[in-house]
Image (cartoon, grey):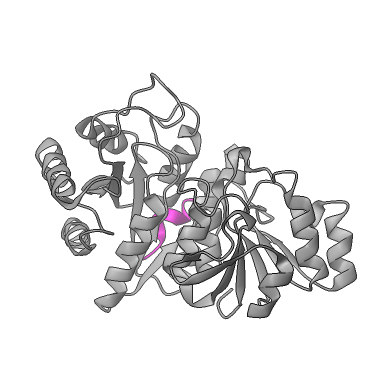
Amino acid sequence: MSGERLLILAEGYSADTHYGKTMRGLLRYRREDVVAILDSERVGAEIDGVQVVGSVEAALAYAPTTALVGVATQGGRFPPAWRALLADCIRSGLNVENGLHEFLADDPELGPLAALHGVTLRDLRHPPAGLDCPTGENLRVPADIVLTVGSDCAIGKMTVSLELDREARSRGLASVFVPTGQTGIAIAGWGIAVDAVVSDFVAGAAERLVIEGHERGGELLLVEGQGAISHPAYSGVTLGLLHGSAPHVLVLCHRAGAVEVDGYPGQPVLPLAELVELYERVSLPARRATVACVALNTAELDDEAAAAAVARAEAETGLPAGDPVRFGAGTLLDALLARLG
């Protein structure tokens, strides 16, 4: 929630660009609320101007009000040593915000401890009550809906959505970022983590999200994508989002240079032109979506190689391309608005 003073819990992961992505997202998009980062392996360091401390006791000097779990661990489980860390936070009077698959409020030890100390445990991945299948209201939302889709997981679909939202709002457009994962929820303060929803109800959850996004004032809705349609493990959540959010337009996201699905050796990343065709073909028949542009993650490249990667993507797909973090989101937003008409 905006206005909280956040201690980001990143024990053992603050230098990890993959598993520490929640911390990095908060530092980029909610920096004003972060007062300290906890990682006993990097005491004394600074990350984006934020001090790294080694214990909850040391963090109290920065007057945090909430400890936010800033990591996304393998399988969404807490490392064993984290239980003592979470208990220290609770005993110190800190609320805890958690985006992992283990729900703290249901924990037989930490739940009662939180009640004893009068603090709140917020499990961001806990699905809301009453989810069901889509009703068709997604097709009647009076807003332009854009969904980020990808060639793989963890390549920046949330970042692209947030950068497009920033650019749109800077132009005076009534834009709303629609969060569908734990980091996006931690940044925006609302949303549904669709990867924790019963599979039959993912599309219904996505419908609920675009309805709420419009109710929050969005005439342009930037929906955070999840997974990838060709991913060997996480294609289901992608298809549910694609059908439930009923987007008018898609942004294809890709990590420049990737040839294999991360963590699945031998499983190829499909060519961009093939992905464009595939996403358009499997979009909701009642509202066929089109890919308007390609957003590249060029973080591992220098400027010259990044520019070359953008040129290759444009040549391969015939669509505008760019890296919204490195080069700005203007070109990509222009392409979206042109396609939306």
- Horizontal and vertical percent position of residue 308: 12, 44
Counting from the top left corner in percent of width and height, residue 283 is at 34, 39
Which stretch appears magenta?
A: 136-142
Residue reaching furthest to the top: 266
Left or right: where does residue 230 sit relative to residue 12? left
Q: Is residue 138 magenta?
A: yes
Q: Position of residue 62 (x, y in %)?
A: 63, 79
Q: What quarter of the picture does the N terminus occupy?
A: bottom right
Q: Is residue 56 visible?
A: yes
In the displayed structure image, the side of residue 210 where residue 259 appears, left or right: left
Image height of 35 relative to 252, above or below: below
- Of residue 54 and residue 227, the one placed in the foreground of this image is 54
Where is residue 155, by image quadrant? top left
Q: Residue at x 90, y 69 (%)?
A: 116
Q: How many marks?
A: 0
Q: Would residue 164 be found to the left or right of residue 21 on screen?
A: left
**Residue at far front of view:** 44
Q: Nearer the viewer, residue 300 or 320?
A: 300
In the image shown, does 157 or 51 lie closer to the viewer?
Answer: 51
Queried whether the magenta region covers residue 212, the answer comes back as no
Instruction: Classify residue 237 as left or right of residue 323.
Output: right
Instruction: Residue at 22% x, 63% y: name it.
Output: 328
Image quarter of residue 336:
bottom left
